[in-house]
Amino acid sequence: MRSIWKGAISFGLVTIPVKLYSATEQKDVTFHQVHREDGGRIRYKRVCTVDGEEVPYSDIAKGYELPTGEIVVLTDEDFEDLPLSTSRRIDVLQFTPADQIDPIYFAKSYYLEPDAQGAKPYVLLRDALENSGQVAVVKVALRQRESLATLRVREGVFVLETMLWPDEIRKTDFGFLEEDVDVRPQELKMAESLIATMVADFDPGEYRDAYREALQQVIEAKVAGKEVIAAPEGEEEAGPAVDLMAALRASVEAAKKERGATTKKEPKKKARKSA
């Protein structure tokens, strides 16, 4: 991995120099737009809608559109005096239990690696934080944006998770929340029973991106010049169940059968007799 930012964790009077790395990556299959006839790449030009002329990057500024449709043009000088920290610090603001932070706030995850001279204070803060069962709430400026974030420990490494601001979380303003929906106790009990039959430890290795794998096979077949065979049609998507209790009961029975099949123990091998 290549670091994308260098700075320091500021914790009281302690400063820990660190390097920042993206902790995740998208595995999507990427495409270019091309001409169907000859495969030529499609290029786009930056053209001004007023004079129709192509505009070089050096002449492009940021514009904010008003409700009236008018544009306010902002220059580099307009951004210079804004209160965006340039100190490259991750300022620890407080410590709090992780379960008090709704996961909807999390935006992007990064790993933090200590510089050579910062290894000892890094490990000290890491161990203290891990033993406390808390996460550190911090403030950091990355890519011209100031964010709240949390610091937690994963596999011995600090993970910095940037957060959205409260006004960036949309309200759950849905009509059904105002309706008086009648759920019978026996229906609730059956739904809870279905949940209980499907409880398992989470192992991300058990899941895969079947669509991406199939798409990659199509591309490989194209490269190899093989005939591409269409994937079989899937089962039709079931509509809403008319009899909710019957559907829940059937789901519980199916889940029990599937759980029984996957957890069925193999016959024990006979113990060897000692010589």
Image: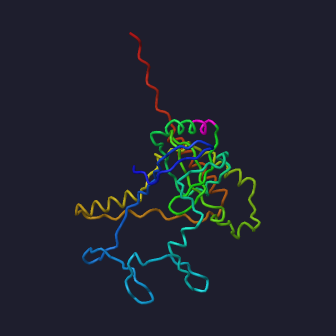
Image coloring type: rainbow
| Closer to us: 242 or 146 | 146
Q: Is 95 included in the stretch rendered in magenta? A: no
Q: Which residues are magenta?
A: 127-131
Q: Work out which residue is located at the far bottom of the displayed protein and give it.
A: 51
Q: Is 130 included in the stretch rendered in magenta? A: yes
Q: Position of residue 236 (x, y in %)?
A: 49, 65
Q: Residue at x 75, y 68 (%)?
A: 178
Q: Is residue 19 above or below residue 38?
A: above
Q: Position of residue 129 (x, y in %)?
A: 61, 39
Q: Is residue 23 visible?
A: no
Q: Work out which residue is located at the far top of the displayed protein and give it.
A: 275
Q: Is residue 37 above or below residue 112?
A: below
Q: Is residue 187 above or below residue 64?
A: above
| Closer to us: 224 or 161 | 161
Q: Position of residue 164 (x, y in %)?
A: 60, 60
Q: Is residue 227 visible?
A: yes
| Closer to us: 9 or 77 | 77
| Closer to us: 63 or 15 | 15
Residue 69, picture quadrant: bottom right
Q: Is residue 178 above or below residue 154?
A: below
Q: Residue at x 63, y 44 (%)?
A: 12
Q: Is residue 226 left or right of residue 91?
A: left
Q: Quadrant of the C terminus?
A: top left
